[in-house]
Amino acid sequence: MQDIIQPPDPFKALSIIYLFTACIFTIGRIYSLIKIAWLRKKGIYPLKGMESLEYVKKLLTQGEFALAIKCYRKIYGNNISLKGAKESVLAIKSELENNNL
């Protein structure tokens, strides 16, 4: 009698891919939390509830564009979309660049 070759289990492959993806997202989230804690210690990122446009400007001068948008959205809450916050932060960034020239 010949051995029948069984095809690989697709659920096993999918579970490995899912586990890998979950690990990558977890590592990214941990990195983000560590980075924010480090920037808070340096006085660049605000403590919770202390967000202001001055911190947005500090973040922009440090090259932390994504965190500047995050801080800006915390200032204005649900009243502003991600796109609106990005446009506003870009305007602040261009204003800072024009003042430095």
Image (spheres, grey):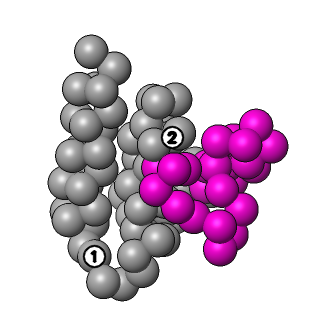
Location of residue 65 in the rendering, given as x and y in whole percent from the top left corner: 39, 41
Which residue is depicted at the point 30% across and 83% down? 79
Whether 43 is drawn above or below 77: the answer is above
Tell me the quadrant of the picture where the C terminus can be found: top left
| Mark with earlier residue (2, 1) | 2
Q: Crowdedness of circle 2 by 10 Å Cα count: few (<14), some, many (20+)?
A: many
Which residue is depicted at the point 46% across and 71% down? 75
* 10 sits to left or right of 50: left
Q: Is residue 41 magenta?
A: yes
Whether 73 is drawn above or below 90: the answer is below
| Depth order, front residue of 90/22 | 90
Range of magenta residues: 29-56
Which residue is depicted at the point 64% across and 42% down? 44
Residue 80 shows which numbered tag? Answer: 1
User: As drawn, which residue projects farthest toward the bottom?
Assistant: 78
| Depth order, front residue of 85/66 | 85
Is residue 34 visible in the rendered image? The answer is no
* 35 sits to left or right of 69: right
Query: Rounded to the nearest whole Å, what is the CA distance between mark 2 and mark 1?
Result: 19 Å
Location of residue 57 in the rendering, given as x and y in whole percent from the top left corner: 45, 43
| Depth order, front residue of 3/74 | 74
Residue 59 shows which numbered tag? Answer: 2
Kind of element beneath mark 2: helix
